[in-house]
Amino acid sequence: MSEFDLIRRLHERINGVDAAVSSACIVGIGDDGAVLDIPSDRQLVVTVDTLVEGVHFPSTTDVQRLGHKALAVNLSDLASMGAQPAWFFLALTLPAPDLSWLDSFTQGMGDLARSAGIVLAGGDTTAGPLSVTITAMGLVEPGMALTRDGARNGDLVVVSGQLGDAAYALELLKAGGMPDYHSRAALENPEPRLKLGRRLRGLATSCIDLSDGLVADLGHILKASAVGAEIKLDLLPGSAGLANLPEGQRWQLQAAGGDDYELCFTIPANRRNELDRVATECGSPLSVIGEITASGELVCLMDNGNVFVPQGRGYDHFNSGIRP
Amino acid sequence: MSEFDLIRRLHERINGVDAAVSSACIVGIGDDGAVLDIPSDRQLVVTVDTLVEGVHFPSTTDVQRLGHKALAVNLSDLASMGAQPAWFFLALTLPAPDLSWLDSFTQGMGDLARSAGIVLAGGDTTAGPLSVTITAMGLVEPGMALTRDGARNGDLVVVSGQLGDAAYALELLKAGGMPDYHSRAALENPEPRLKLGRRLRGLATSCIDLSDGLVADLGHILKASAVGAEIKLDLLPGSAGLANLPEGQRWQLQAAGGDDYELCFTIPANRRNELDRVATECGSPLSVIGEITASGELVCLMDNGNVFVPQGRGYDHFNSGIRP
């Protein structure tokens, strides 16, 4: 299969066989670049993520789930900015053009792309060690993008979904164990919180997606907003499976585990009563886990009032081993 | 050095220490995504290219020149679309965070970025086998992007600069020889034809940049435009160094060598007299090398009137060896 056949196949399997590239994409796959019409009443949100075999996922990863996850981590960034997904560009480096590998990969990626309403508009394919770089673009009303720098003293800290399952599954896999279905799905099939991210425009004062772990990612909000936070560990939402673990292990997974792809955001305390409606509308459980302080520090409190200090402060790609 | 220090360093060294990200980039490096204001009277042109060590460049490549070239090949795509460079996103995968490597790399990339007027607006850094993926964005007036599909029977085929020097340098390097300064610069320091690309709006009926070789790339225009072309080999512009080679070797390098990063475009025959002025204004030599035919075939004619068939039809990343 030539590079050109490969590109055509990616387009057909991800966008759908009969899909013209969307009407706002004037020139799509097959020219030197894509030409996009950006609506004049929108700003463009752009995010880039790379997944490298052996660094972000083990070589045993199910290929269809890899296709899903490579796009999901980018969509999660669009969600955390409050953006509506629009187009993405796929740079795929493969040791060799393997048709059955590619069909599984595009199955996972295409299913998610179509359900999220995002169109593959271009990219590059080349030979080399397996890695996937996606540039995803979304649209947001001017000035409405959710950023990291708006958290204020007294705001509530909220997270969606449950934390720690993905990290627990990875811990088990590394130890040669077998995670339960729920944890494994959290690790390999994260669902980006796109609807929630859109709904938070005008409500959240700051927002980030949890990829590197709660402590690291909430830390980015605190730094950008020049504030601190006090988190109550027994408020962290977790699955029934995690509830049976020793507290120290559970908190480590939930506070510093990473790969949750849930949203962590802040809201003014006087708007707390809106959360139930948002959760119902978006199908995302929401939990208040603490509040913003003026201290500049992030403090994680155990239920006896003592401070818990997680090992590590979240994932750093240059100072850690393999990552899902 | 942590991932976050690395990102800060990339920003400072590429955009300039004091550079705020441009005014149209509302949120830049350091959030989940960049937020860009696209002028309402422009379309967005997006292109993605990956360079992998051992595939697109040998591990002995000068790092500063690698930084230049990784951005140059993307700018060349923007040039061939007639777009004005605006922002780029850098996904950099490195075996380890090596400060002196990084400083050389960002020196080459930053010099070119500032001279081209393009701003680093985000990206991703991760550990893994060395590769560079850049997503570059440019702006073009609505409907004015140069594409591959507008060549018409009777149009003239034009190329900028000289062809074959980069391929000659690579051939020498592979054989253990030492290319002259001029050829080596063509290979490692290509200058994207940005000014020319902009100038061709409204003049060229189709345009492409020469990355995979004249025959392969002109072939894309012919296929997209459903036409053929007749090229006269003795009209191909070449350096003095190439003129001394046997004709067969020279034509092979010029017609199928690749990595020229010159523009190949078509114009209506009755506008030929405008080329001299364009060449002068843009500082790009321009050569008419043939014309578009109705045949659907690409024919390369030797000066005795016989047809020359180059070996291979241009570079295919999955069916060839190392490439500069």
Image: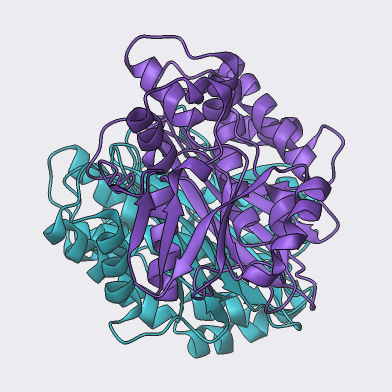
Chain colours: A purple, B cyan
Residue B102, image quadrant: bottom left
Q: Is residue B35 above or below residue A91?
A: below
In depth, the one of B130 and A281 nearer the eye is A281
Picture residue at 26% right of the left edge, 44% below the top: A312
Left-right relation of B73 to A119: left
Residue B15 image position (x, y, % from top left): 35, 78
Picture residue at 79% right of the left edge, 60% below the top: A26
Residue B290, image quadrant: bottom right
Residue A136 image position (x, y, % from top left): 61, 53
In depth, the one of B118 and A306 nearer the eye is A306
Residue A219, image quadrant: bottom left
In depth, the one of A270 and B298 nearer the eye is A270
Residue furthest to the front in view is A304
Q: Is residue A176 above or below residue B125?
A: above
Left-right relation of A11 to B9: right
Residue B42 image position (x, y, % from top left): 72, 79
Residue B31 visible (yes or no): no
In this rendering, the count of numbered labels is 0
Q: Is residue B299 above or below residue A37?
A: above
Q: Locate the N terminus of chain B by quadrant.
A: bottom left
Left-right relation of A113 to B231: right
